[in-house]
Image (tube, rainbow, N blue to C red):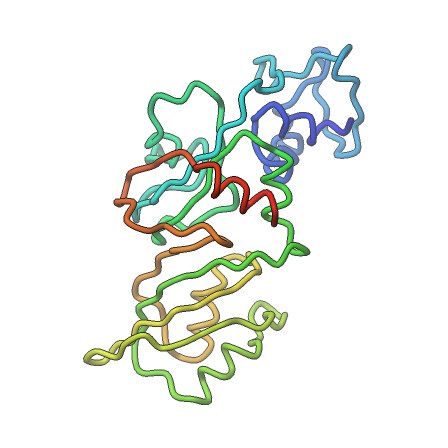
C-alpha cells in the first residue's frame, strides 16, 4: 500500500495533505525519514510515524459537518497560532481533518472526517461534485458578465469550467449571487468575480453536493445522519 494512502486511512490527513507531510520530512517508516511519494509499505509489518508519533488505522469512521466562521483557518495547525477548524470540534477522540478547504475569510459548510478514501473521492475533480456559494459582490453584474461566469472565464492562465450563476438580489450598489462550481481551484469564486470587475465582499458555502448547511449556526457542528452519509458515498 502506498504510504500516503495508509496515512489517510489512519486519519492523519487527506492523501494530498499526507504527501505534503512526506515532502516536509515529517514522516518516518521504521524509524527512517521517507521523502519519496511512491513509497510502498506493508501495513502488517512496517511502523509508520508522523512527527515521531506512531499512527494506526482508525477503527471508527467519523463524518462531521461544520459551519466554519470567518477568521478560522482550515488546517490542523497554524504557524501563526490562529484558531483552526479542529479547535471547534470538541468531544471527538478520533483524529479528523477537513475535506478540501475554505479560505480564512470564507464561511460556511466544511466537512471533516477520518475516512481518507472518501475524502479523496470527494475532492477529486473527476467526480464533478458541485459546491454552492452565496456571494455578496460589489456592483450589479450585467447579462454579459453573468454569461462569462457561467460559460468559463480565464483565471491563473486557465479557463474555468461552466458554472451555475444567478442573481438573488440587488441592493444599493451591491448584489447577492448564488454560484455553483465543481472545481476546487485556489480562491476560485473570488477570482472569477474579480475577473468581471465585481469583487467579492462576503462569501459563504451553503452546500456540498446534496449536503445542505441548513440552519446549522456559525461555529457549530454535527455528525452527518445516515441519509446524508449515503448521499455523499453515492457521489
Question: For the point 45% across and 32% down, which residue is it?
Answer: 76
170, 70: nearer the viewer = 170
Question: Eyeballing the image, is 78 above or below 6?
Answer: below
x then y, percent, for residue 165: 45, 74
**Is 79 positioned to the left or the right of 174 in the image?**
right
x then y, percent, for residue 44: 76, 12
226, 153: nearer the viewer = 226
Residue found at the far left of this picture:
172
Quadrant of res 206: bottom left
Residue found at the far front of this picture:
227
Question: For the point 55% across and 56% down, which residue is it?
Answer: 184
**Is 123 positioned to the left or the right of 79 in the image?**
right
Q: Quadrant of the N terminus?
A: top right
173, 24: nearer the viewer = 173
| Count of picture labels | 0
x then y, percent, for residue 174: 26, 76
Question: For the point 58% across and 14% down, which residue is it?
Answer: 52
Question: Eyeballing the image, is 88 above or below 139?
Answer: above
Question: Eyeballing the image, is 128 above or below 163?
Answer: above
Question: For the point 65% across and 23% down, which residue is it?
Answer: 27
Quadrant of res 133: bottom left
Amino acid at each position: 500500500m502506498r504510504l500516503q494512502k495508509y496515512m489517510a486511512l489512519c486519519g492523519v490527513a487527506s492523501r494530498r495533505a499526507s504527501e505534503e507531510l512526506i515532502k516536509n520530512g515529517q514522516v518516518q517508516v521504521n524509524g527512517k525519514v521517507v521523502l519519496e511519494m511512491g513509497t510502498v509499505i506493508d501495513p502488517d509489518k512496517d511502523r509508520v510515524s508522523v512527527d515521531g508519533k506512531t499512527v494506526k488505522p482508525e477503527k471508527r469512521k467519523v463524518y462531521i459537518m461544520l459551519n466554519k466562521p470567518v477568521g478560522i483557518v482550515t488546517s490542523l495547525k497554524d504557524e501563526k497560532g490562529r484558531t483552526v477548524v479542529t479547535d471547534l470540534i470538541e468531544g471527538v477522540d478520533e483524529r479528523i481533518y477537513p475535506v478540501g478547504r475554505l479560505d480564512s475569510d470564507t464561511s460556511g459548510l466544511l466537512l471533516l472526517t477520518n475516512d481518507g478514501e472518501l475524502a479523496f473521492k470527494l475532492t477529486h475533480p473527476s467526480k464533478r461534485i458541485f459546491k454552492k456559494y452565496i456571494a455578496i459582490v460589489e456592483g450589479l453584474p450585467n447579462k454579459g458578465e453573468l454569461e462569462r461566469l457561467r460559460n468559463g472565464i480565464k483565471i491563473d492562465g486557465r479557463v474555468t469550467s461552466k458554472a451555475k450563476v444567478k442573481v438573488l438580489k440587488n441592493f444599493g450598489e451591491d448584489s447577492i449571487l448564488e454560484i455553483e462550481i465543481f472545481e476546487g481551484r485556489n480562491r476560485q469564486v473570488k477570482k472569477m468575480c474579480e475577473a468581471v470587475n465585481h469583487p467579492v465582499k462576503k462569501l459563504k458555502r451553503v452546500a456540498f453536493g446534496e449536503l445542505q448547511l441548513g440552519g446549522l449556526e456559525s461555529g457549530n457542528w454535527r455528525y452527518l445522519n445516515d441519509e446524508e452519509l449515503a448521499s455523499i458515498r453515492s457521489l
